[in-house]
Image (tube, helix red, strand yellow):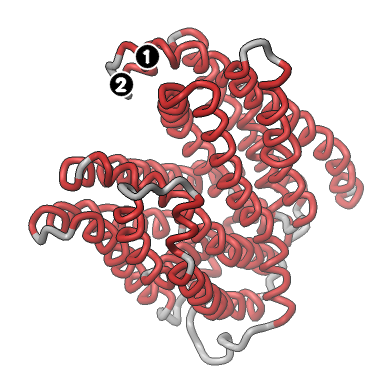
Amino acid sequence: MTRTGSLKATELGTQPIRQLLFKYAMPAIIAMTASSLYNIVDSIFIGHGCGPLALSGLTVAKPMMDICVAFGSFVGVGASTLVAIFLGEKNYENAGRTLGNVIVLNVILSVVVMSAGLIWIEPVLRAFGGSEDTLPYAKDYMEIILYGNVVTHIYFGLNNMLRSMGHPKTSMAATIVAVTVNIALDPIFIFGLDMGVRGAALATVISQMIAVIWQFVIFCNPQELIHFKRGIWRLDKHITLRSFAIGTSPFLMNIAHCIVVIIINRQLVLFGGDMALAAYGVINRFIFVFAMIVMGLNQGMQPIVGYNYGAQQYPRMLRAFQLTAICASIVMGIVFILGECAPMWMIRIFTHDAELTEAAVVPMRILCCSMWLVGFQMVTGNFFTSIGKAGIAIFLSLTRQVLYLIPLTLCLPMIFGEPLSGVWWSLPVSDTLSALTAAFILWRQLPKFREVNN
Protein backbone atom coordinates (compact mmCIF):
# COMPACT_ATOMS: atom_id res chain seq x y z
CA MET A 1 0.00 0.00 0.00
CA THR A 2 1.32 3.45 -0.93
CA ARG A 3 1.97 5.54 2.10
CA THR A 4 0.50 9.03 2.52
CA GLY A 5 3.87 10.66 3.12
CA SER A 6 5.33 9.10 -0.03
CA LEU A 7 2.59 10.56 -2.21
CA LYS A 8 3.01 13.99 -0.63
CA ALA A 9 6.77 13.89 -1.04
CA THR A 10 6.53 12.83 -4.68
CA GLU A 11 4.26 15.72 -5.65
CA LEU A 12 7.04 18.15 -4.67
CA GLY A 13 9.06 16.83 -7.58
CA THR A 14 6.29 16.40 -10.17
CA GLN A 15 3.44 18.91 -9.86
CA PRO A 16 3.63 22.37 -11.50
CA ILE A 17 5.64 24.81 -9.38
CA ARG A 18 3.00 27.54 -9.47
CA GLN A 19 0.38 25.10 -8.18
CA LEU A 20 2.72 23.76 -5.50
CA LEU A 21 3.70 27.22 -4.27
CA PHE A 22 0.08 28.22 -3.92
CA LYS A 23 -0.76 24.95 -2.17
CA TYR A 24 2.09 25.20 0.33
CA ALA A 25 2.27 28.95 0.83
CA MET A 26 -1.41 29.73 1.40
CA PRO A 27 -1.75 27.56 4.53
CA ALA A 28 1.47 29.10 5.88
CA ILE A 29 0.20 32.63 5.18
CA ILE A 30 -3.12 31.84 6.88
CA ALA A 31 -1.24 30.38 9.87
CA MET A 32 1.01 33.44 10.14
CA THR A 33 -2.02 35.73 9.93
CA ALA A 34 -3.72 33.73 12.69
CA SER A 35 -0.62 34.12 14.85
CA SER A 36 -0.68 37.88 14.25
CA LEU A 37 -4.35 37.98 15.26
CA TYR A 38 -3.52 36.11 18.45
CA ASN A 39 -0.82 38.65 19.38
CA ILE A 40 -3.27 41.51 18.89
CA VAL A 41 -6.09 39.87 20.85
CA ASP A 42 -3.70 38.75 23.59
CA SER A 43 -2.51 42.33 24.04
CA ILE A 44 -6.10 43.58 24.23
CA PHE A 45 -6.98 41.11 27.00
CA ILE A 46 -3.83 41.89 28.97
CA GLY A 47 -4.28 45.64 28.53
CA HIS A 48 -7.86 45.59 29.79
CA GLY A 49 -7.35 42.93 32.44
CA CYS A 50 -3.94 43.90 33.85
CA GLY A 51 -3.38 47.54 32.88
CA PRO A 52 -0.83 49.51 30.83
CA LEU A 53 2.13 48.53 33.05
CA ALA A 54 1.47 44.90 32.16
CA LEU A 55 1.70 45.75 28.46
CA SER A 56 4.99 47.53 29.15
CA GLY A 57 6.16 44.42 30.99
CA LEU A 58 5.37 42.27 27.94
CA THR A 59 7.36 44.68 25.77
CA VAL A 60 10.31 44.22 28.11
CA ALA A 61 9.87 40.43 27.97
CA LYS A 62 9.62 40.24 24.17
CA PRO A 63 13.39 40.14 23.42
CA MET A 64 13.75 37.28 25.91
CA MET A 65 10.90 35.43 24.20
CA ASP A 66 12.59 36.06 20.84
CA ILE A 67 15.76 34.46 22.18
CA CYS A 68 13.76 31.35 23.16
CA VAL A 69 12.28 31.28 19.63
CA ALA A 70 15.79 31.63 18.21
CA PHE A 71 16.94 28.46 19.98
CA GLY A 72 13.82 26.67 18.78
CA SER A 73 14.53 27.64 15.16
CA PHE A 74 18.11 26.47 15.66
CA VAL A 75 16.77 22.90 15.65
CA GLY A 76 13.40 23.12 13.88
CA VAL A 77 14.35 24.99 10.70
CA GLY A 78 17.55 23.02 10.16
CA ALA A 79 15.92 19.63 10.70
CA SER A 80 12.89 20.38 8.51
CA THR A 81 15.19 21.53 5.69
CA LEU A 82 17.17 18.30 6.02
CA VAL A 83 13.97 16.24 5.83
CA ALA A 84 12.98 17.94 2.56
CA ILE A 85 16.45 17.27 1.12
CA PHE A 86 16.45 13.63 2.29
CA LEU A 87 13.00 13.06 0.79
CA GLY A 88 14.24 14.48 -2.51
CA GLU A 89 17.18 12.06 -2.36
CA LYS A 90 14.75 9.19 -1.52
CA ASN A 91 16.76 8.71 1.68
CA TYR A 92 13.76 7.82 3.86
CA GLU A 93 15.86 6.22 6.60
CA ASN A 94 17.72 9.45 7.36
CA ALA A 95 14.50 11.43 7.06
CA GLY A 96 12.98 9.25 9.80
CA ARG A 97 16.05 9.63 11.99
CA THR A 98 15.83 13.39 11.60
CA LEU A 99 12.31 13.30 13.04
CA GLY A 100 13.57 11.49 16.14
CA ASN A 101 16.51 13.87 16.43
CA VAL A 102 14.14 16.86 16.33
CA ILE A 103 12.34 15.63 19.45
CA VAL A 104 15.49 14.71 21.39
CA LEU A 105 17.41 17.86 20.47
CA ASN A 106 14.45 20.11 21.24
CA VAL A 107 14.02 18.53 24.68
CA ILE A 108 17.72 18.91 25.54
CA LEU A 109 18.06 22.46 24.21
CA SER A 110 14.79 23.71 25.69
CA VAL A 111 15.71 22.40 29.16
CA VAL A 112 19.05 24.21 28.95
CA VAL A 113 17.37 27.46 27.85
CA MET A 114 14.70 27.12 30.53
CA SER A 115 17.26 26.56 33.29
CA ALA A 116 19.48 29.44 32.21
CA GLY A 117 16.48 31.74 31.77
CA LEU A 118 15.05 31.01 35.20
CA ILE A 119 18.43 31.48 36.90
CA TRP A 120 19.20 34.85 35.27
CA ILE A 121 15.67 36.08 34.60
CA GLU A 122 15.86 39.30 36.65
CA PRO A 123 19.21 40.64 35.37
CA VAL A 124 18.26 39.76 31.79
CA LEU A 125 14.89 41.55 32.00
CA ARG A 126 16.54 44.58 33.62
CA ALA A 127 19.05 44.69 30.77
CA PHE A 128 16.13 44.75 28.32
CA GLY A 129 14.71 47.84 30.02
CA GLY A 130 12.70 46.46 32.93
CA SER A 131 11.98 48.98 35.70
CA GLU A 132 10.73 48.49 39.24
CA ASP A 133 7.19 48.96 37.94
CA THR A 134 7.34 46.73 34.85
CA LEU A 135 9.76 44.03 36.03
CA PRO A 136 7.18 42.11 38.15
CA TYR A 137 4.84 41.73 35.14
CA ALA A 138 7.67 40.71 32.81
CA LYS A 139 9.01 38.20 35.33
CA ASP A 140 5.57 36.66 36.05
CA TYR A 141 4.94 36.20 32.34
CA MET A 142 8.37 34.84 31.40
CA GLU A 143 8.54 32.34 34.27
CA ILE A 144 5.49 30.50 32.91
CA ILE A 145 6.75 30.74 29.33
CA LEU A 146 10.13 29.32 30.35
CA TYR A 147 8.56 26.41 32.26
CA GLY A 148 6.63 25.58 29.07
CA ASN A 149 9.65 26.03 26.81
CA VAL A 150 9.90 22.30 26.03
CA VAL A 151 6.35 22.28 24.70
CA THR A 152 6.96 25.41 22.62
CA HIS A 153 10.11 24.02 21.00
CA ILE A 154 8.49 20.69 20.11
CA TYR A 155 5.38 22.44 18.77
CA PHE A 156 7.31 24.66 16.36
CA GLY A 157 9.73 21.85 15.43
CA LEU A 158 6.98 19.39 14.49
CA ASN A 159 5.06 22.06 12.61
CA ASN A 160 8.11 22.68 10.43
CA MET A 161 8.42 18.93 9.90
CA LEU A 162 4.80 18.66 8.77
CA ARG A 163 5.38 21.25 6.04
CA SER A 164 8.53 19.48 4.83
CA MET A 165 6.65 16.15 4.70
CA GLY A 166 4.00 17.58 2.39
CA HIS A 167 1.32 18.48 4.96
CA PRO A 168 1.04 22.29 4.76
CA LYS A 169 -2.68 22.28 5.61
CA THR A 170 -2.11 20.10 8.68
CA SER A 171 0.63 22.47 9.82
CA MET A 172 -1.75 25.39 9.33
CA ALA A 173 -4.50 23.58 11.24
CA ALA A 174 -2.16 22.96 14.19
CA THR A 175 -1.39 26.67 14.36
CA ILE A 176 -5.06 27.64 14.15
CA VAL A 177 -5.92 25.13 16.90
CA ALA A 178 -3.25 26.64 19.17
CA VAL A 179 -4.36 30.20 18.42
CA THR A 180 -8.07 29.43 18.91
CA VAL A 181 -7.54 27.64 22.23
CA ASN A 182 -5.25 30.45 23.39
CA ILE A 183 -7.80 33.16 22.64
CA ALA A 184 -10.53 31.12 24.36
CA LEU A 185 -8.44 30.55 27.50
CA ASP A 186 -7.16 34.12 27.85
CA PRO A 187 -10.35 35.69 29.29
CA ILE A 188 -10.93 32.64 31.52
CA PHE A 189 -7.50 32.80 33.12
CA ILE A 190 -7.05 36.58 33.11
CA PHE A 191 -10.56 37.67 34.17
CA GLY A 192 -12.34 34.56 35.48
CA LEU A 193 -9.48 33.16 37.59
CA ASP A 194 -7.84 36.56 38.15
CA MET A 195 -4.39 35.21 37.22
CA GLY A 196 -3.21 38.34 35.39
CA VAL A 197 -0.25 38.02 33.05
CA ARG A 198 0.51 34.57 34.45
CA GLY A 199 -2.89 33.49 33.13
CA ALA A 200 -2.04 34.80 29.67
CA ALA A 201 1.25 32.90 29.67
CA LEU A 202 -0.42 29.73 30.96
CA ALA A 203 -3.03 29.97 28.19
CA THR A 204 -0.21 30.11 25.64
CA VAL A 205 1.54 27.02 27.01
CA ILE A 206 -1.67 24.96 27.34
CA SER A 207 -2.80 25.82 23.81
CA GLN A 208 0.55 24.72 22.39
CA MET A 209 0.40 21.54 24.47
CA ILE A 210 -2.95 20.63 22.90
CA ALA A 211 -1.49 21.24 19.43
CA VAL A 212 1.53 19.05 20.30
CA ILE A 213 -0.75 16.18 21.37
CA TRP A 214 -2.50 16.38 17.99
CA GLN A 215 0.87 16.46 16.21
CA PHE A 216 1.97 13.35 18.11
CA VAL A 217 -1.17 11.53 16.99
CA ILE A 218 -0.28 12.32 13.37
CA PHE A 219 3.33 11.19 13.72
CA CYS A 220 2.27 7.96 15.46
CA ASN A 221 0.38 6.92 12.31
CA PRO A 222 2.41 4.12 10.64
CA GLN A 223 0.82 5.02 7.30
CA GLU A 224 2.94 8.18 7.28
CA LEU A 225 6.22 7.75 5.44
CA ILE A 226 7.97 9.44 8.38
CA HIS A 227 6.59 8.47 11.76
CA PHE A 228 7.60 7.62 15.32
CA LYS A 229 9.19 4.19 15.56
CA ARG A 230 12.07 2.37 17.15
CA GLY A 231 15.56 3.26 16.03
CA ILE A 232 15.03 6.97 15.31
CA TRP A 233 15.63 8.36 18.80
CA ARG A 234 19.40 7.95 19.06
CA LEU A 235 21.19 11.16 18.17
CA ASP A 236 22.98 10.92 14.83
CA LYS A 237 26.14 13.03 14.72
CA HIS A 238 25.87 13.72 11.00
CA ILE A 239 22.21 14.75 11.17
CA THR A 240 22.72 16.82 14.31
CA LEU A 241 25.65 18.78 12.90
CA ARG A 242 23.90 19.40 9.58
CA SER A 243 20.72 20.51 11.37
CA PHE A 244 22.69 22.93 13.52
CA ALA A 245 24.65 24.23 10.52
CA ILE A 246 21.46 25.00 8.57
CA GLY A 247 19.62 26.29 11.65
CA THR A 248 22.45 28.66 12.54
CA SER A 249 21.21 31.19 9.98
CA PRO A 250 17.70 31.77 11.45
CA PHE A 251 19.18 31.45 14.96
CA LEU A 252 21.70 34.23 14.42
CA MET A 253 19.11 36.29 12.58
CA ASN A 254 16.77 36.17 15.59
CA ILE A 255 19.57 36.95 18.04
CA ALA A 256 20.77 39.82 15.86
CA HIS A 257 17.21 41.11 15.64
CA CYS A 258 16.99 41.27 19.44
CA ILE A 259 20.24 43.24 19.61
CA VAL A 260 19.14 45.60 16.85
CA VAL A 261 15.77 46.27 18.51
CA ILE A 262 17.50 47.24 21.74
CA ILE A 263 19.98 49.56 19.96
CA ILE A 264 17.33 51.25 17.77
CA ASN A 265 15.00 51.74 20.73
CA ARG A 266 17.77 53.37 22.74
CA GLN A 267 18.76 55.65 19.85
CA LEU A 268 15.16 56.71 19.19
CA VAL A 269 14.55 57.54 22.86
CA LEU A 270 17.88 59.40 23.05
CA PHE A 271 17.25 61.63 20.03
CA GLY A 272 13.44 61.69 19.76
CA GLY A 273 11.96 60.64 23.10
CA ASP A 274 9.01 58.36 23.73
CA MET A 275 7.02 59.74 20.80
CA ALA A 276 9.69 58.65 18.31
CA LEU A 277 9.69 55.19 19.87
CA ALA A 278 5.90 55.05 19.62
CA ALA A 279 6.06 56.13 15.97
CA TYR A 280 8.53 53.33 15.25
CA GLY A 281 6.17 50.86 16.89
CA VAL A 282 3.23 51.97 14.74
CA ILE A 283 5.25 51.78 11.51
CA ASN A 284 6.59 48.35 12.47
CA ARG A 285 3.06 47.05 13.05
CA PHE A 286 2.05 48.23 9.58
CA ILE A 287 5.09 46.66 7.87
CA PHE A 288 4.84 43.49 9.97
CA VAL A 289 1.43 42.61 8.54
CA PHE A 290 2.91 42.37 5.03
CA ALA A 291 6.20 40.84 6.20
CA MET A 292 4.19 37.96 7.66
CA ILE A 293 2.81 37.26 4.18
CA VAL A 294 6.36 37.06 2.83
CA MET A 295 7.31 34.76 5.69
CA GLY A 296 4.39 32.54 4.69
CA LEU A 297 5.64 32.52 1.10
CA ASN A 298 9.08 31.52 2.39
CA GLN A 299 7.62 28.67 4.42
CA GLY A 300 5.74 27.48 1.35
CA MET A 301 8.86 27.67 -0.82
CA GLN A 302 11.16 25.83 1.62
CA PRO A 303 9.97 22.20 1.13
CA ILE A 304 9.63 22.67 -2.64
CA VAL A 305 13.15 24.04 -3.03
CA GLY A 306 14.65 21.58 -0.54
CA TYR A 307 13.06 18.53 -2.17
CA ASN A 308 14.02 19.48 -5.72
CA TYR A 309 17.54 20.40 -4.63
CA GLY A 310 17.89 16.94 -3.06
CA ALA A 311 16.45 15.37 -6.23
CA GLN A 312 18.84 17.48 -8.36
CA GLN A 313 15.91 18.94 -10.29
CA TYR A 314 17.52 22.37 -10.38
CA PRO A 315 15.25 24.04 -12.98
CA ARG A 316 12.23 23.31 -10.74
CA MET A 317 14.15 24.55 -7.71
CA LEU A 318 15.06 27.82 -9.44
CA ARG A 319 11.53 28.26 -10.76
CA ALA A 320 10.17 27.97 -7.22
CA PHE A 321 12.64 30.61 -6.03
CA GLN A 322 11.79 32.91 -8.95
CA LEU A 323 8.04 32.77 -8.38
CA THR A 324 8.43 33.30 -4.63
CA ALA A 325 10.73 36.28 -5.15
CA ILE A 326 8.28 37.87 -7.59
CA CYS A 327 5.33 37.38 -5.23
CA ALA A 328 7.31 38.71 -2.26
CA SER A 329 8.43 41.76 -4.23
CA ILE A 330 4.82 42.51 -5.19
CA VAL A 331 3.69 42.21 -1.55
CA MET A 332 6.41 44.52 -0.23
CA GLY A 333 5.87 46.80 -3.23
CA ILE A 334 2.37 47.40 -1.87
CA VAL A 335 3.99 48.49 1.41
CA PHE A 336 6.12 50.96 -0.56
CA ILE A 337 3.10 52.42 -2.38
CA LEU A 338 0.89 52.71 0.72
CA GLY A 339 3.70 54.08 2.88
CA GLU A 340 4.65 56.74 0.33
CA CYS A 341 1.20 57.71 -0.96
CA ALA A 342 -1.06 57.29 2.08
CA PRO A 343 1.09 57.29 5.24
CA MET A 344 -1.44 59.15 7.38
CA TRP A 345 -4.24 56.73 6.51
CA MET A 346 -2.02 53.76 7.39
CA ILE A 347 -0.99 55.31 10.71
CA ARG A 348 -4.58 56.08 11.69
CA ILE A 349 -5.41 52.39 11.48
CA PHE A 350 -3.34 51.98 14.64
CA THR A 351 -3.82 55.31 16.43
CA HIS A 352 -5.99 58.44 16.41
CA ASP A 353 -3.54 60.46 18.51
CA ALA A 354 -2.78 63.64 16.53
CA GLU A 355 0.71 64.13 17.96
CA LEU A 356 1.73 60.55 17.28
CA THR A 357 0.26 60.64 13.77
CA GLU A 358 2.23 63.78 12.95
CA ALA A 359 5.42 62.28 14.40
CA ALA A 360 5.07 59.10 12.32
CA VAL A 361 4.25 60.45 8.84
CA VAL A 362 7.77 61.41 7.72
CA PRO A 363 9.42 58.30 9.27
CA MET A 364 6.78 56.15 7.54
CA ARG A 365 7.84 57.53 4.16
CA ILE A 366 11.53 57.09 5.01
CA LEU A 367 11.21 53.49 6.21
CA CYS A 368 8.94 52.44 3.33
CA CYS A 369 11.06 53.88 0.52
CA SER A 370 13.16 50.69 0.34
CA MET A 371 10.41 48.14 1.01
CA TRP A 372 10.17 47.09 -2.63
CA LEU A 373 13.66 45.55 -2.20
CA VAL A 374 13.03 43.81 1.12
CA GLY A 375 10.88 40.97 -0.24
CA PHE A 376 13.64 39.86 -2.61
CA GLN A 377 16.24 39.98 0.17
CA MET A 378 14.08 37.90 2.53
CA VAL A 379 13.38 35.22 -0.09
CA THR A 380 17.02 35.01 -1.21
CA GLY A 381 18.23 34.38 2.33
CA ASN A 382 15.59 31.71 2.84
CA PHE A 383 16.46 30.10 -0.51
CA PHE A 384 20.01 29.36 0.60
CA THR A 385 18.73 28.07 3.94
CA SER A 386 16.34 25.74 2.09
CA ILE A 387 19.13 24.10 0.08
CA GLY A 388 21.41 23.70 3.09
CA LYS A 389 23.94 26.39 2.09
CA ALA A 390 24.45 27.35 5.72
CA GLY A 391 27.44 29.67 5.26
CA ILE A 392 25.76 31.82 2.62
CA ALA A 393 22.47 31.89 4.52
CA ILE A 394 24.20 32.97 7.73
CA PHE A 395 26.06 35.74 5.94
CA LEU A 396 22.92 37.05 4.26
CA SER A 397 20.91 36.89 7.48
CA LEU A 398 23.50 39.00 9.27
CA THR A 399 24.33 41.55 6.57
CA ARG A 400 21.30 43.75 7.15
CA GLN A 401 21.27 43.68 10.93
CA VAL A 402 24.91 43.36 11.96
CA LEU A 403 27.10 44.36 9.01
CA TYR A 404 24.97 47.33 7.93
CA LEU A 405 22.17 48.33 10.33
CA ILE A 406 23.98 48.48 13.67
CA PRO A 407 26.92 50.60 12.38
CA LEU A 408 24.57 52.86 10.40
CA THR A 409 22.25 53.33 13.39
CA LEU A 410 25.20 54.43 15.50
CA CYS A 411 27.02 56.53 12.84
CA LEU A 412 24.35 58.30 10.75
CA PRO A 413 22.96 60.35 13.68
CA MET A 414 26.41 61.95 13.95
CA ILE A 415 26.48 62.74 10.22
CA PHE A 416 22.96 64.12 9.81
CA GLY A 417 22.23 67.63 11.03
CA GLU A 418 19.21 66.22 12.84
CA PRO A 419 20.33 63.02 14.68
CA LEU A 420 16.83 61.51 14.71
CA SER A 421 16.72 61.61 10.90
CA GLY A 422 19.98 59.66 10.88
CA VAL A 423 18.35 56.90 12.93
CA TRP A 424 15.37 56.74 10.55
CA TRP A 425 17.53 56.70 7.39
CA SER A 426 19.77 53.92 8.75
CA LEU A 427 16.92 51.45 8.13
CA PRO A 428 16.29 51.96 4.38
CA VAL A 429 20.00 52.37 3.66
CA SER A 430 20.74 49.01 5.31
CA ASP A 431 17.80 47.45 3.43
CA THR A 432 19.22 48.66 0.11
CA LEU A 433 22.77 47.52 0.84
CA SER A 434 21.63 44.08 2.03
CA ALA A 435 19.41 43.60 -1.06
CA LEU A 436 22.34 44.50 -3.34
CA THR A 437 24.54 42.06 -1.43
CA ALA A 438 21.94 39.29 -1.79
CA ALA A 439 21.63 40.00 -5.53
CA PHE A 440 25.41 39.82 -6.00
CA ILE A 441 25.75 36.50 -4.14
CA LEU A 442 22.78 35.04 -6.03
CA TRP A 443 24.33 36.15 -9.33
CA ARG A 444 27.54 34.33 -8.38
CA GLN A 445 25.75 31.12 -7.30
CA LEU A 446 23.08 30.58 -9.98
CA PRO A 447 25.49 29.63 -12.82
CA LYS A 448 26.73 26.72 -10.70
CA PHE A 449 23.27 25.14 -10.68
CA ARG A 450 22.87 25.65 -14.41
CA GLU A 451 26.25 24.07 -15.09
CA VAL A 452 25.38 20.99 -13.01
CA ASN A 453 22.04 20.65 -14.80
CA ASN A 454 23.67 20.81 -18.21
User: Which quadrant of the structure image shows residue 345?
Assistant: top left
Extreme residue in the top direction: 341
Judge the density around disc 2: few (<14), some (14-19), many (≥20) Cα neighbours within 10 Å.
few
| 69 horizontally vs 383: left or right | left
Q: Which residue is mark 1?
A: 357
Judge the density around disc 1: few (<14), some (14-19), many (≥20) Cα neighbours within 10 Å.
many
Q: Which residue is mark 2?
A: 351
Q: What residue sits 45% from the left and 55% below the top?
A: 125
Q: Amino acid at mark 2?
A: Thr
Q: In terms of sequence position, does the residue under pointer 2 or pointer 1 come before the other? A: 2
Report the front residue among 87 and 81: 81
| 391 horizontally vs 74: left or right | right
| 222 horizontally vs 247: left or right | left
Q: Can residue 315 be seen?
A: yes
| Vertical placement of residue 344 versus 292, above or below | above
Q: Point out residue 306 in the picture as x, y percentages from the top left corner.
A: 67, 56
Instruction: Give the label on residue 181, or none.
Output: none
Disc 1 is placed on an element classified as helix
Extreme residue in the front direction: 132
| Vertical placement of residue 8 versus 363, above or below | below
Q: What residue sits 68% from the left and 33% below the top?
A: 405
Q: Amino acid at mark 1?
A: Thr
